[in-house]
Image (cartoon, rainbow, N blue to C red):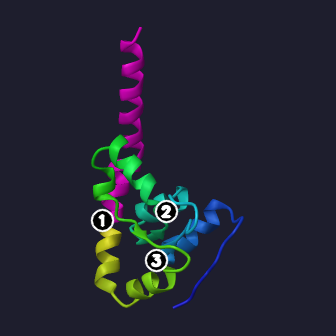
Amino acid sequence: MELIYFTDVPNRKLRFYQSQADVVCDMLTLGWFGANVREALMLGKPAVCFLRPEWIEQVRREVPGYVEELPVVNATPETVHDVVAELIDDPAKRKELGERGREFALKWHSAKAAARRFDQIYSELLETK
């Protein structure tokens, strides 16, 4: 197993490495995930990041169903070694998380999902006039 760390890398190059990764880790201190994790999920890769408890609860209230389906593995800088080691030692769990991640990304973050959300927002704006 090899750890590869990136910073300030063009997205195209990063995706090359993501597609070969067994596990993708990102944002271990912020408290939520960004494009890197969403892309990993879309690629069917298990994703690890820090999920701040209060933000999880906020998202749970604002977007029903999202948190309950979220397949991102929670870790902090202090726990990431053990979390990743567990995933490395359990190929079945990596496969299951990867499959759930792909389904989740298609449902919540695909172009179709975004179009549905924008249509909903646009319709609500038109109704308020």
Image coords of residue 25 (percent x, y): 52, 72
* 11 displayed left or right of 42: right
Residue that mark 1 sits on: 100
Helix, strand or loop at label 3? It is: loop
Rendered-image quadrant of the C terminus: top left
Residue 93 lies, with reference to residue 111, above or below; the image says below
Helix, strand or loop at label 1? It is: helix
Residues in magenta, as a range: 100-129
Image coords of residue 41 (percent x, y): 42, 63
- First along the sequence among labels 2 and 1: 2
* Amino acid at circle 3: Val
Residue 109 lies, with reference to residue 26, above or below; the image says above
Q: Which residue does the image show at 58% across and 85% down from the upper left?
A: 3
Q: Residues within 10 Å of mark 2 (few under 14, many from 20)?
A: many
The majority secondary structure of the magenta stretch comes to: helix
Residue that mark 3 sits on: 23
Residue that mark 2 sits on: 37
Outermost residue on the top side: it is 129
